[in-house]
Amino acid sequence: MSESKSLKDNSFFQSGTLDTSSRQFSVARFMANLVALLIPIFGAKLIEMQNMLHVFNVFVLSLVFIGILTF
């Protein structure tokens, strides 16, 4: 099995359609909802938290990109 084939099999998109019933998609959706619900619970201001999450994503996406290039 080629590497590009295995990477495609692990994505949310199977054969050009979004596979919302996969476990990987459900976990990602749960994590996104959890973060979205925790922001008001802690009493944080929405705009400040959005800015903080954007800055956080810059570092996380950079680490993911480095990880993809090294492995």
Image (tube, helix red, strand yellow):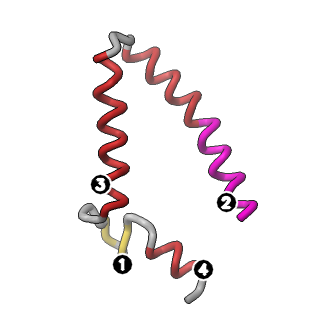
Work out whether mark 1 precedes mark 4 in sequence or the reverse, and give the earlier one. Answer: 4
Question: Pointer 4: what residue?
Answer: 3
Give the magenta range: 58-71
Q: CA distance from mark 2 to mark 4?
A: 13 Å
Q: State whether residue 33 is above or below residue 18.
A: above
Quadrant of res 44: top left
Q: Earlier in the sequence, mark 1 or mark 3?
A: 1
First in sequence: mark 3 or mark 4? 4
Q: Position of residue 39 (x, y in %)?
A: 35, 21
Q: CA distance from mark 1 to mark 3?
A: 19 Å
Mark 1 residue element:
loop
Considering only order in the chain, which callout, 3 or 2, is on the residue closer to the N terminus? 3
The residue to which callout 2 is attached is: 68
Question: Could you tell which of marks 2 and 4 lies nearer the N-terminus?
Answer: 4
Horizontal side, residue 53 vs residue 24: left or right: right
Q: Which residue is mark 1?
A: 15
Instruction: Please name the amino acid that badge 3 sits on.
Output: Ser
Q: Which residue is mark 3?
A: 26
Q: Is residue 1 left or right of residue 9?
A: right
